[in-house]
Image (cartoon, rainbow, N blue to C red):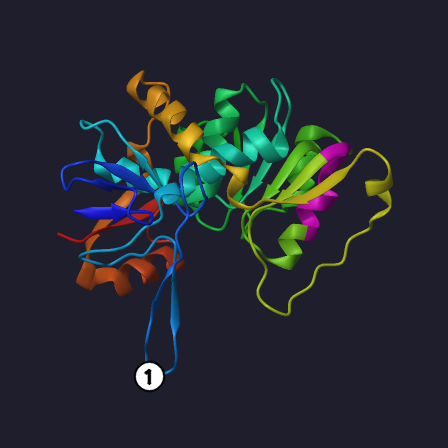
Amino acid sequence: MLRCGPGVRTVAPDDLVALHWRPGAGLEGLPAHYDSPRGPINGGWVTTFNEAALISENRLTRLPPDFDPAWGALLGCAVTTGFGVVNNNARLRIGESILVCGAGGIGLNIVQAAALVSAWPIIATDLFDNRLDLAASLGATHCFNARRDNIEAAVRELLGPTGADVAVDNTGHPEVIAAAYRLTAPHGRTVLVGVPPKGRETTLNTLPLHFEKSLTGSHGGDARPDRDIPRYVRLIQQGRLDLAPLIGRRYALDQINQAIADMRSGAVAGRCLIQLA
């Protein structure tokens, strides 16, 4: 049995649940701590690679018994964050334009969510063509490769000098953050999902923030997994949302270093799925 919360309830081995780092409803227990030669390690509220784990009640959401477990893994972060960015942070409206910088797992779900709310155009940028091809299949109307294309010139040619209603950075690179902000319309919203490396800073012209432009950081799309995941499950069951293309490749646990290398090199588009058994 997997005990959830401080002895409140249990989940049977055959029950299917999505684990998520954003808190949902229910009790929150203390995170696990482990001893190591270098000192204590904080395991967080959701631990992985365990045969057994103590997980807070508010970090899991029950899924239908016939739901694909692989899709449940995607609901833990990539889907809830991407859709939360569109719904909660950007508040993207029908017909608004959006620039998505970085077409990884979260960026691809931002593209899907933007398509569901009928945004136009939906512009995706990335360093790898295979990720852009996947973004196009999920709803991106225009794709640009940052290695070859002048992103700022391309976006302004498409949208005009004002830029996009919404620009989202998923990369965390200070230069991309600054470009996304510059490419946001005077009345628009810039949302930062990617986290810059420690010690790296971005320089921005803050004057537009005193008028209608906004700049905000996203914390997991401000998602409420216990409320959001059941809604997304309904969309999947009705064929309105397809998560299958997001799984780029499956790896055994002893191939995890190769999975990380493939993600970094761009060899895989979408998410790498680690199969523990």
Q: Position of residue 227 (x, y in %)?
A: 43, 28
Residue most toward the front? 7
Residue 232 horizontal side relative to residue 144, left or right? left
Residue 230 horizontal side relative to residue 140, left or right? left
**Residue 123 seen in the figure:** no
Which quarter of the figure has residue 80? top left
Residue most toward the bottom? 37
- Residue 183 in the magenta stretch? The answer is yes
State the SS at label 1. loop
Question: Looking at the image, which is closer to me, 184 or 150?
Answer: 184
Q: Residue at x 54, y 47 (%)?
A: 170
Q: Residue at x 77, y 53 (%)?
A: 204
Q: Which residues are magenta?
A: 178-188
Q: Which residue is mark 1?
A: 37
Q: Residue at x 36, y 55 (%)?
A: 263
Q: Is residue 77 above or below residue 274?
A: above
